[in-house]
Amino acid sequence: MRNDAQDTIAAAATPPGSGGIAVVRISGPKTPQIARHILQKLPKPRFATLGDFHGADGERIDTGIALYFPAPHSFTGEHVLELHGHGGPVPVANLVETAITLGARRAEPGEFTKRAFLNDKLDLVQAEAVADLVGSGSRQAARAALRSLSGEFSTAIAALQERLTRLRMHVEAAIDFPEEEIDFLADAGLRREIEECAEAFATLTRKAQVGRVLRDGYRMVIAGRPNAGKSSLLNRLSGEDTAIVTEIAGTTRDILRERIDIDGLSVELVDTAGLRENPDRIEAEGIRRARDAIRSADAVLWIEDAAGQGDTQGDYAGQDFPQDIPRIVVRNKIDLSGDAPGRAEASTPTINLSAKTGAGLEALRVAIRDLAGYQDLGEGAFTARRRHLEALERSKTHFEVGALALEQNKAGELLAEELRLAQQALGEITGTFTSDDLLGRIFAEFCIGK
Ligand SMILES: Nc1nc2c(ncn2[C@@H]2O[C@H](COP(=O)(O)OP(=O)(O)OP(=O)(O)O)[C@@H](O)[C@H]2O)c(=O)[nH]1
Ligand SMILES: [Mg+2]
Protein backbone atom coordinates (compact mmCIF):
# COMPACT_ATOMS: atom_id res chain seq x y z
CA MET A 1 0.00 0.00 0.00
CA ARG A 2 1.27 3.44 -0.86
CA ASN A 3 0.28 6.94 0.08
CA ASP A 4 -0.51 8.92 -3.00
CA ALA A 5 -2.04 11.84 -1.14
CA GLN A 6 -0.97 14.95 -2.94
CA ASP A 7 -2.69 17.38 -0.65
CA THR A 8 -1.28 19.11 2.38
CA ILE A 9 -3.06 18.86 5.73
CA ALA A 10 -3.06 21.10 8.79
CA ALA A 11 -4.50 20.84 12.31
CA ALA A 12 -3.85 21.74 15.90
CA ALA A 13 -2.00 18.84 17.51
CA THR A 14 -2.76 20.03 21.04
CA PRO A 15 -6.23 19.89 22.63
CA PRO A 16 -8.62 22.83 22.20
CA GLY A 17 -8.74 25.48 24.92
CA SER A 18 -6.09 27.56 26.63
CA GLY A 19 -2.68 26.28 27.67
CA GLY A 20 0.96 27.19 27.88
CA ILE A 21 1.67 26.42 24.26
CA ALA A 22 -0.26 25.00 21.35
CA VAL A 23 1.20 23.09 18.43
CA VAL A 24 -0.08 23.37 14.88
CA ARG A 25 1.10 20.68 12.54
CA ILE A 26 1.27 20.87 8.75
CA SER A 27 2.17 17.91 6.54
CA GLY A 28 2.40 17.42 2.80
CA PRO A 29 4.10 18.67 -0.36
CA LYS A 30 3.08 22.31 0.08
CA THR A 31 4.62 22.51 3.55
CA PRO A 32 7.86 24.29 2.45
CA GLN A 33 6.01 27.05 0.63
CA ILE A 34 3.58 27.52 3.53
CA ALA A 35 6.54 27.64 5.93
CA ARG A 36 8.26 30.26 3.78
CA HIS A 37 5.19 32.42 3.95
CA ILE A 38 4.39 32.10 7.66
CA LEU A 39 8.03 32.34 8.81
CA GLN A 40 9.30 34.46 5.91
CA LYS A 41 12.01 31.86 5.39
CA LEU A 42 12.36 28.07 5.45
CA PRO A 43 13.77 27.14 8.90
CA LYS A 44 16.88 25.00 9.14
CA PRO A 45 15.70 21.34 9.20
CA ARG A 46 15.28 19.81 12.65
CA PHE A 47 16.42 22.95 14.50
CA ALA A 48 14.23 24.85 16.94
CA THR A 49 13.91 28.30 15.38
CA LEU A 50 12.42 31.21 17.31
CA GLY A 51 10.54 33.73 15.19
CA ASP A 52 7.35 35.51 14.22
CA PHE A 53 4.42 33.72 12.59
CA HIS A 54 2.64 35.68 9.85
CA GLY A 55 -0.87 35.40 8.51
CA ALA A 56 -1.80 35.03 4.84
CA ASP A 57 -1.85 38.82 4.40
CA GLY A 58 1.59 39.18 6.02
CA GLU A 59 0.30 40.41 9.37
CA ARG A 60 2.11 39.13 12.50
CA ILE A 61 -0.25 36.70 14.30
CA ASP A 62 1.98 35.05 16.90
CA THR A 63 5.55 34.41 17.86
CA GLY A 64 7.01 31.05 18.80
CA ILE A 65 9.17 28.09 17.85
CA ALA A 66 9.15 26.49 14.42
CA LEU A 67 10.40 22.98 13.65
CA TYR A 68 10.80 21.82 10.07
CA PHE A 69 11.22 18.13 9.16
CA PRO A 70 11.82 17.60 5.42
CA ALA A 71 10.57 14.33 3.90
CA PRO A 72 11.14 11.49 4.46
CA HIS A 73 12.54 12.08 7.95
CA SER A 74 9.36 13.05 9.74
CA PHE A 75 6.47 11.42 11.62
CA THR A 76 4.33 11.17 8.48
CA GLY A 77 7.21 10.64 6.05
CA GLU A 78 6.20 13.87 4.30
CA HIS A 79 7.47 17.45 4.73
CA VAL A 80 6.24 18.47 8.18
CA LEU A 81 6.17 21.85 9.89
CA GLU A 82 5.39 22.22 13.58
CA LEU A 83 4.54 25.65 14.90
CA HIS A 84 4.69 25.97 18.68
CA GLY A 85 2.78 29.13 19.49
CA HIS A 86 0.86 30.56 22.41
CA GLY A 87 -1.81 28.23 23.68
CA GLY A 88 -5.02 30.08 23.01
CA PRO A 89 -7.95 29.26 20.72
CA VAL A 90 -7.55 32.45 18.64
CA PRO A 91 -3.83 32.21 17.78
CA VAL A 92 -4.33 28.51 16.97
CA ALA A 93 -7.33 29.18 14.71
CA ASN A 94 -5.36 32.00 13.02
CA LEU A 95 -2.48 29.65 12.23
CA VAL A 96 -4.67 26.81 10.93
CA GLU A 97 -6.68 29.22 8.78
CA THR A 98 -3.50 30.76 7.42
CA ALA A 99 -2.24 27.32 6.39
CA ILE A 100 -5.58 26.64 4.70
CA THR A 101 -5.53 29.96 2.84
CA LEU A 102 -2.04 29.04 1.67
CA GLY A 103 -3.21 25.73 0.18
CA ALA A 104 -3.55 23.19 2.97
CA ARG A 105 -6.82 21.60 4.07
CA ARG A 106 -8.07 20.64 7.51
CA ALA A 107 -6.79 17.20 8.58
CA GLU A 108 -9.27 14.43 9.28
CA PRO A 109 -9.11 12.50 12.58
CA GLY A 110 -5.97 10.36 12.71
CA GLU A 111 -4.83 11.53 9.28
CA PHE A 112 -1.24 12.29 10.31
CA THR A 113 -0.89 8.78 11.76
CA LYS A 114 -2.64 7.30 8.74
CA ARG A 115 -0.09 8.94 6.47
CA ALA A 116 2.70 7.62 8.71
CA PHE A 117 1.21 4.13 8.18
CA LEU A 118 0.77 4.56 4.40
CA ASN A 119 4.37 5.78 4.15
CA ASP A 120 5.65 2.74 6.09
CA LYS A 121 6.75 4.76 9.10
CA LEU A 122 4.56 2.61 11.33
CA ASP A 123 2.69 -0.64 10.82
CA LEU A 124 -0.98 -0.89 11.73
CA VAL A 125 -0.37 -2.29 15.22
CA GLN A 126 1.93 0.63 15.98
CA ALA A 127 -0.51 3.15 14.55
CA GLU A 128 -3.23 1.72 16.78
CA ALA A 129 -0.83 1.85 19.72
CA VAL A 130 -0.54 5.61 19.21
CA ALA A 131 -4.27 5.91 19.92
CA ASP A 132 -4.05 3.39 22.77
CA LEU A 133 -1.27 5.34 24.44
CA VAL A 134 -3.24 8.56 24.14
CA GLY A 135 -6.32 6.86 25.55
CA SER A 136 -4.66 4.66 28.18
CA GLY A 137 -6.48 4.51 31.48
CA SER A 138 -3.73 3.22 33.74
CA ARG A 139 0.02 3.36 34.03
CA GLN A 140 0.27 -0.33 33.12
CA ALA A 141 -1.86 0.20 30.01
CA ALA A 142 0.28 3.17 28.98
CA ARG A 143 3.47 1.17 29.39
CA ALA A 144 2.03 -1.70 27.37
CA ALA A 145 0.84 0.65 24.62
CA LEU A 146 4.30 2.14 24.44
CA ARG A 147 5.73 -1.35 23.96
CA SER A 148 3.33 -1.98 21.08
CA LEU A 149 4.28 1.38 19.64
CA SER A 150 7.96 0.44 19.86
CA GLY A 151 7.18 -2.63 17.79
CA GLU A 152 7.24 -5.46 20.35
CA PHE A 153 3.91 -6.90 19.25
CA SER A 154 4.85 -6.45 15.57
CA THR A 155 8.15 -8.24 16.13
CA ALA A 156 6.37 -11.18 17.76
CA ILE A 157 4.04 -11.43 14.77
CA ALA A 158 6.97 -11.19 12.36
CA ALA A 159 8.70 -14.06 14.21
CA LEU A 160 5.58 -16.20 13.86
CA GLN A 161 5.31 -15.28 10.16
CA GLU A 162 8.90 -16.38 9.75
CA ARG A 163 8.19 -19.77 11.37
CA LEU A 164 5.17 -20.28 9.12
CA THR A 165 7.25 -19.37 6.06
CA ARG A 166 9.91 -21.95 6.98
CA LEU A 167 7.28 -24.63 7.47
CA ARG A 168 5.61 -23.71 4.19
CA MET A 169 8.91 -23.88 2.32
CA HIS A 170 9.58 -27.27 3.84
CA VAL A 171 6.18 -28.60 2.75
CA GLU A 172 6.24 -26.98 -0.69
CA ALA A 173 9.69 -28.35 -1.43
CA ALA A 174 8.37 -31.82 -0.69
CA ILE A 175 5.31 -31.32 -2.91
CA ASP A 176 7.47 -30.12 -5.79
CA PHE A 177 9.19 -33.48 -6.13
CA PRO A 178 6.26 -35.85 -6.43
CA GLU A 179 8.37 -38.55 -8.07
CA GLU A 180 10.13 -39.06 -4.77
CA GLU A 181 7.77 -40.94 -2.54
CA ILE A 182 7.43 -38.62 0.45
CA ASP A 183 6.19 -39.63 3.81
CA PHE A 184 5.35 -36.41 5.63
CA LEU A 185 4.54 -38.28 8.80
CA ALA A 186 7.97 -39.87 8.99
CA ASP A 187 9.69 -36.52 8.63
CA ALA A 188 10.82 -35.69 12.16
CA GLY A 189 12.03 -32.21 11.18
CA LEU A 190 8.62 -31.31 9.81
CA ARG A 191 6.84 -32.60 12.90
CA ARG A 192 9.09 -30.52 15.10
CA GLU A 193 8.42 -27.40 13.03
CA ILE A 194 4.68 -27.96 13.31
CA GLU A 195 4.94 -28.35 17.07
CA GLU A 196 6.99 -25.19 17.35
CA CYS A 197 4.43 -23.25 15.34
CA ALA A 198 1.65 -24.53 17.59
CA GLU A 199 3.57 -23.37 20.66
CA ALA A 200 4.30 -19.99 19.10
CA PHE A 201 0.58 -19.53 18.36
CA ALA A 202 -0.34 -20.43 21.95
CA THR A 203 2.19 -18.04 23.47
CA LEU A 204 1.27 -15.13 21.25
CA THR A 205 -2.46 -15.68 21.81
CA ARG A 206 -1.95 -15.66 25.58
CA LYS A 207 0.03 -12.43 25.43
CA ALA A 208 -2.46 -10.79 23.09
CA GLN A 209 -5.33 -11.76 25.38
CA VAL A 210 -3.64 -10.07 28.31
CA GLY A 211 -2.87 -7.10 26.08
CA ARG A 212 -6.54 -6.83 25.13
CA VAL A 213 -7.54 -6.85 28.79
CA LEU A 214 -4.96 -4.16 29.55
CA ARG A 215 -6.43 -1.96 26.87
CA ASP A 216 -10.14 -2.56 27.34
CA GLY A 217 -10.37 -3.78 30.91
CA TYR A 218 -11.81 -7.11 32.09
CA ARG A 219 -15.57 -7.37 32.21
CA MET A 220 -16.98 -9.62 34.93
CA VAL A 221 -20.65 -10.23 35.44
CA ILE A 222 -21.82 -11.00 38.97
CA ALA A 223 -24.61 -13.55 38.72
CA GLY A 224 -26.42 -16.05 40.87
CA ARG A 225 -29.67 -16.76 42.72
CA PRO A 226 -31.61 -13.89 44.32
CA ASN A 227 -30.32 -12.86 47.76
CA ALA A 228 -27.00 -14.67 47.32
CA GLY A 229 -25.26 -11.33 48.01
CA LYS A 230 -24.31 -10.14 44.51
CA SER A 231 -24.99 -6.48 45.19
CA SER A 232 -23.28 -6.70 48.57
CA LEU A 233 -20.17 -8.06 46.85
CA LEU A 234 -20.23 -5.30 44.22
CA ASN A 235 -20.37 -2.70 46.98
CA ARG A 236 -17.65 -4.43 48.98
CA LEU A 237 -15.25 -4.77 46.00
CA SER A 238 -15.75 -1.21 44.80
CA GLY A 239 -15.76 0.35 48.25
CA GLU A 240 -18.87 2.29 47.21
CA ASP A 241 -22.48 1.98 48.28
CA THR A 242 -23.73 1.85 44.70
CA ALA A 243 -26.18 -1.04 44.73
CA ILE A 244 -29.26 -1.34 46.91
CA VAL A 245 -29.01 -4.28 49.27
CA THR A 246 -32.04 -5.71 51.08
CA GLU A 247 -33.10 -9.02 52.51
CA ILE A 248 -35.88 -9.13 49.89
CA ALA A 249 -35.11 -11.60 47.09
CA GLY A 250 -35.30 -9.82 43.75
CA THR A 251 -33.97 -6.43 44.86
CA THR A 252 -31.78 -5.78 41.81
CA ARG A 253 -33.46 -5.50 38.42
CA ASP A 254 -31.38 -3.02 36.45
CA ILE A 255 -27.80 -3.72 35.38
CA LEU A 256 -25.27 -1.84 37.51
CA ARG A 257 -21.67 -1.22 36.54
CA GLU A 258 -18.69 -0.27 38.66
CA ARG A 259 -15.04 -0.10 37.63
CA ILE A 260 -12.41 -1.32 40.07
CA ASP A 261 -8.66 -1.51 39.90
CA ILE A 262 -6.83 -4.67 40.99
CA ASP A 263 -3.08 -3.90 40.97
CA GLY A 264 -3.45 -2.00 37.71
CA LEU A 265 -5.91 -4.45 36.14
CA SER A 266 -9.04 -2.50 35.31
CA VAL A 267 -12.10 -4.66 36.02
CA GLU A 268 -15.63 -3.67 35.11
CA LEU A 269 -18.04 -5.36 37.51
CA VAL A 270 -21.61 -5.81 36.33
CA ASP A 271 -24.26 -6.53 38.98
CA THR A 272 -27.38 -8.28 37.71
CA ALA A 273 -30.80 -9.48 38.79
CA GLY A 274 -30.88 -12.77 40.66
CA LEU A 275 -31.83 -15.73 38.47
CA ARG A 276 -34.93 -17.65 39.44
CA GLU A 277 -38.07 -19.23 38.07
CA ASN A 278 -41.44 -17.49 38.11
CA PRO A 279 -40.25 -13.90 38.50
CA ASP A 280 -42.61 -10.94 38.13
CA ARG A 281 -42.56 -8.98 34.87
CA ILE A 282 -39.93 -6.40 35.85
CA GLU A 283 -37.70 -9.05 37.34
CA ALA A 284 -38.08 -11.21 34.22
CA GLU A 285 -36.72 -8.33 32.13
CA GLY A 286 -33.84 -7.99 34.61
CA ILE A 287 -33.06 -11.70 34.25
CA ARG A 288 -33.11 -11.42 30.46
CA ARG A 289 -30.60 -8.56 30.69
CA ALA A 290 -28.45 -10.56 33.09
CA ARG A 291 -28.25 -13.42 30.57
CA ASP A 292 -27.31 -10.96 27.81
CA ALA A 293 -24.59 -9.43 29.98
CA ILE A 294 -23.14 -12.86 30.67
CA ARG A 295 -22.95 -13.68 26.96
CA SER A 296 -20.70 -10.68 26.30
CA ALA A 297 -18.64 -10.98 29.49
CA ASP A 298 -14.99 -11.96 29.78
CA ALA A 299 -15.83 -13.93 32.90
CA VAL A 300 -18.55 -14.61 35.47
CA LEU A 301 -18.49 -14.29 39.24
CA TRP A 302 -21.00 -16.93 40.21
CA ILE A 303 -22.29 -16.22 43.72
CA GLU A 304 -23.73 -18.91 45.94
CA ASP A 305 -25.08 -18.64 49.44
CA ALA A 306 -22.80 -20.83 51.57
CA ALA A 307 -25.34 -20.67 54.37
CA GLY A 308 -28.30 -21.48 52.13
CA GLN A 309 -30.00 -24.71 53.06
CA GLY A 310 -30.84 -27.19 50.37
CA ASP A 311 -30.91 -24.68 47.53
CA THR A 312 -29.99 -27.02 44.73
CA GLN A 313 -30.85 -24.55 41.98
CA GLY A 314 -27.77 -22.49 42.71
CA ASP A 315 -25.38 -24.37 40.43
CA TYR A 316 -23.91 -22.73 37.38
CA ALA A 317 -24.23 -25.95 35.41
CA GLY A 318 -28.03 -25.82 35.55
CA GLN A 319 -28.20 -22.35 33.99
CA ASP A 320 -29.21 -21.44 30.52
CA PHE A 321 -26.05 -19.68 29.37
CA PRO A 322 -22.72 -20.54 27.79
CA GLN A 323 -20.86 -23.03 29.93
CA ASP A 324 -17.46 -22.17 28.49
CA ILE A 325 -17.17 -18.65 29.90
CA PRO A 326 -14.37 -18.59 32.49
CA ARG A 327 -15.76 -18.21 35.97
CA ILE A 328 -15.06 -18.02 39.65
CA VAL A 329 -17.49 -19.50 42.14
CA VAL A 330 -17.93 -17.33 45.21
CA ARG A 331 -19.40 -19.00 48.27
CA ASN A 332 -20.70 -15.99 50.19
CA LYS A 333 -21.94 -15.52 53.77
CA ILE A 334 -19.30 -17.66 55.44
CA ASP A 335 -19.83 -15.54 58.57
CA LEU A 336 -23.07 -17.54 58.87
CA SER A 337 -21.90 -20.91 57.53
CA GLY A 338 -18.62 -21.02 59.44
CA ASP A 339 -16.48 -22.02 56.41
CA ALA A 340 -12.84 -20.90 56.40
CA PRO A 341 -12.20 -17.85 54.22
CA GLY A 342 -10.08 -18.12 51.06
CA ARG A 343 -9.65 -20.56 48.24
CA ALA A 344 -11.52 -23.85 48.48
CA GLU A 345 -10.56 -27.14 46.82
CA ALA A 346 -12.55 -27.45 43.60
CA SER A 347 -12.01 -27.90 39.87
CA THR A 348 -13.54 -24.48 39.14
CA PRO A 349 -11.77 -21.72 41.12
CA THR A 350 -13.87 -21.34 44.27
CA ILE A 351 -13.53 -18.68 46.95
CA ASN A 352 -15.16 -18.71 50.38
CA LEU A 353 -15.86 -15.20 51.58
CA SER A 354 -18.17 -12.89 53.39
CA ALA A 355 -19.32 -9.75 51.61
CA LYS A 356 -20.49 -8.59 55.02
CA THR A 357 -17.19 -8.83 56.93
CA GLY A 358 -14.75 -8.74 54.00
CA ALA A 359 -13.09 -12.04 54.99
CA GLY A 360 -11.70 -13.89 51.95
CA LEU A 361 -11.85 -10.82 49.71
CA GLU A 362 -8.12 -10.72 49.01
CA ALA A 363 -8.25 -14.33 47.79
CA LEU A 364 -10.97 -13.27 45.35
CA ARG A 365 -8.82 -10.42 44.02
CA VAL A 366 -5.96 -12.86 43.42
CA ALA A 367 -8.31 -15.31 41.69
CA ILE A 368 -9.61 -12.56 39.38
CA ARG A 369 -6.07 -11.55 38.46
CA ASP A 370 -5.17 -15.17 37.74
CA LEU A 371 -8.27 -15.75 35.64
CA ALA A 372 -7.48 -12.67 33.53
CA GLY A 373 -3.95 -14.04 33.00
CA TYR A 374 -2.68 -10.91 34.69
CA GLN A 375 -0.05 -12.68 36.79
CA ASP A 376 2.31 -13.60 33.95
CA LEU A 377 2.42 -10.08 32.56
CA GLY A 378 5.84 -9.21 33.85
CA GLU A 379 7.65 -6.62 31.80
CA GLY A 380 6.76 -8.08 28.42
CA ALA A 381 3.15 -6.92 28.09
CA PHE A 382 1.98 -5.04 25.03
CA THR A 383 -1.51 -3.77 24.23
CA ALA A 384 -3.69 -5.60 21.77
CA ARG A 385 -7.19 -5.17 20.42
CA ARG A 386 -10.13 -7.46 19.82
CA ARG A 387 -9.41 -7.10 16.10
CA HIS A 388 -5.92 -8.53 16.63
CA LEU A 389 -7.22 -11.46 18.67
CA GLU A 390 -9.79 -12.32 16.03
CA ALA A 391 -7.22 -12.31 13.25
CA LEU A 392 -4.82 -14.33 15.39
CA GLU A 393 -7.57 -16.84 16.13
CA ARG A 394 -8.40 -17.18 12.42
CA SER A 395 -4.75 -17.64 11.59
CA LYS A 396 -4.40 -20.32 14.24
CA THR A 397 -7.47 -22.16 12.94
CA HIS A 398 -6.03 -22.27 9.41
CA PHE A 399 -2.79 -23.62 10.77
CA GLU A 400 -4.58 -26.28 12.82
CA VAL A 401 -6.81 -27.35 9.94
CA GLY A 402 -3.71 -27.67 7.74
CA ALA A 403 -1.77 -29.63 10.35
CA LEU A 404 -4.71 -31.99 10.77
CA ALA A 405 -4.97 -32.51 7.00
CA LEU A 406 -1.35 -33.56 6.99
CA GLU A 407 -1.75 -35.82 9.99
CA GLN A 408 -4.87 -37.59 8.74
CA ASN A 409 -4.54 -37.55 4.95
CA LYS A 410 -0.88 -36.80 4.32
CA ALA A 411 -2.26 -33.84 2.39
CA GLY A 412 0.80 -31.63 1.98
CA GLU A 413 -0.93 -29.37 -0.58
CA LEU A 414 -3.73 -28.67 1.88
CA LEU A 415 -1.28 -27.77 4.60
CA ALA A 416 0.60 -25.43 2.25
CA GLU A 417 -2.63 -23.69 1.28
CA GLU A 418 -3.82 -23.36 4.89
CA LEU A 419 -0.43 -21.95 5.86
CA ARG A 420 -0.80 -19.32 3.17
CA LEU A 421 -4.21 -18.35 4.59
CA ALA A 422 -2.78 -18.36 8.13
CA GLN A 423 -0.09 -15.92 7.05
CA GLN A 424 -2.61 -13.71 5.34
CA ALA A 425 -4.68 -13.49 8.54
CA LEU A 426 -1.56 -12.55 10.50
CA GLY A 427 -0.79 -9.91 7.89
CA GLU A 428 -4.13 -8.25 8.63
CA ILE A 429 -2.90 -7.48 12.14
CA THR A 430 0.11 -5.47 11.07
CA GLY A 431 -1.59 -4.10 7.96
CA THR A 432 0.19 -6.01 5.19
CA PHE A 433 -3.28 -7.05 4.07
CA THR A 434 -6.01 -4.52 4.87
CA SER A 435 -9.09 -3.04 3.32
CA ASP A 436 -9.73 0.70 3.01
CA ASP A 437 -12.83 0.08 5.03
CA LEU A 438 -10.84 -1.27 7.96
CA LEU A 439 -8.35 1.60 7.77
CA GLY A 440 -11.21 4.08 7.75
CA ARG A 441 -12.68 2.57 10.87
CA ILE A 442 -9.37 2.44 12.72
CA PHE A 443 -8.31 6.01 12.04
CA ALA A 444 -11.77 7.49 12.57
CA GLU A 445 -11.34 6.71 16.29
CA PHE A 446 -8.36 9.06 16.54
CA CYS A 447 -8.53 12.69 17.51
CA ILE A 448 -7.94 15.42 14.96
CA GLY A 449 -4.30 16.45 14.81
CA LYS A 450 -3.01 12.96 15.71
N1 LIG B 1 -24.59 -12.50 57.00
C1 LIG B 1 -24.38 -12.12 55.77
N2 LIG B 1 -25.35 -11.54 55.06
C2 LIG B 1 -25.10 -11.16 53.80
C3 LIG B 1 -23.83 -11.31 53.20
N3 LIG B 1 -23.88 -10.82 51.95
C4 LIG B 1 -25.16 -10.38 51.77
N4 LIG B 1 -25.88 -10.57 52.88
C5 LIG B 1 -27.29 -10.25 53.07
O1 LIG B 1 -28.06 -10.96 52.12
C6 LIG B 1 -29.19 -10.20 51.69
C7 LIG B 1 -29.19 -10.10 50.17
O2 LIG B 1 -28.04 -9.35 49.76
P1 LIG B 1 -27.97 -8.66 48.34
O3 LIG B 1 -26.60 -8.16 48.21
O4 LIG B 1 -29.08 -7.72 48.15
O5 LIG B 1 -28.19 -9.93 47.45
P2 LIG B 1 -28.39 -10.00 45.86
O6 LIG B 1 -27.77 -11.27 45.41
O7 LIG B 1 -27.93 -8.76 45.22
O8 LIG B 1 -29.97 -10.13 45.74
P3 LIG B 1 -30.93 -9.75 44.53
O9 LIG B 1 -30.54 -8.40 44.03
O10 LIG B 1 -32.28 -9.77 45.15
O11 LIG B 1 -30.78 -10.82 43.49
C8 LIG B 1 -29.07 -8.85 52.39
O12 LIG B 1 -29.89 -8.86 53.53
C9 LIG B 1 -27.60 -8.79 52.80
O13 LIG B 1 -27.39 -7.99 53.93
C10 LIG B 1 -22.80 -11.92 54.00
O14 LIG B 1 -21.63 -12.12 53.57
N5 LIG B 1 -23.12 -12.32 55.26
MG1 LIG C 1 -28.81 -7.37 44.11
Image: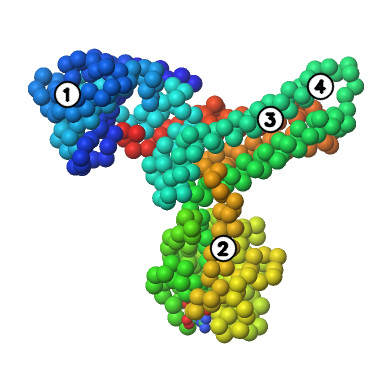
**Residue 61 lies in quadrant:** top left
Q: Label 2 CB, ligand 1: below 8 Å?
A: no
Q: Label 3 CB, ligand 1: below 8 Å?
A: no
Q: Position of residue 181 (x, y in %)?
A: 90, 22
For marks 1 and 4, give the CA distance. 67 Å
For marks 1 and 3, give the CA distance. 54 Å
Q: Label 4 CB, ligand 1: below 8 Å?
A: no
Q: Position of residue 210 (x, y in %)?
A: 56, 48
The earlier-in-sequence mark between 1 and 2 is 1
Number of other residues with Cα within 10 Å of mark 3, as a class: few under 14, some 14 to 19, many 20 or more:
some
Q: Quadrant of the C terminus?
A: top left
What residue is drawn where x is 70% and y is 68%? 346
Mark in front: 2 vs 4: 2
The earlier-in-sequence mark between 1 and 3 is 1
Which residue carries the number 3 mark? Answer: 163
Name the residue nearer the viewer: 305 or 23. 23
Q: Which three-letter amino acid code belongs to the residue tagged 4?
A: Ala
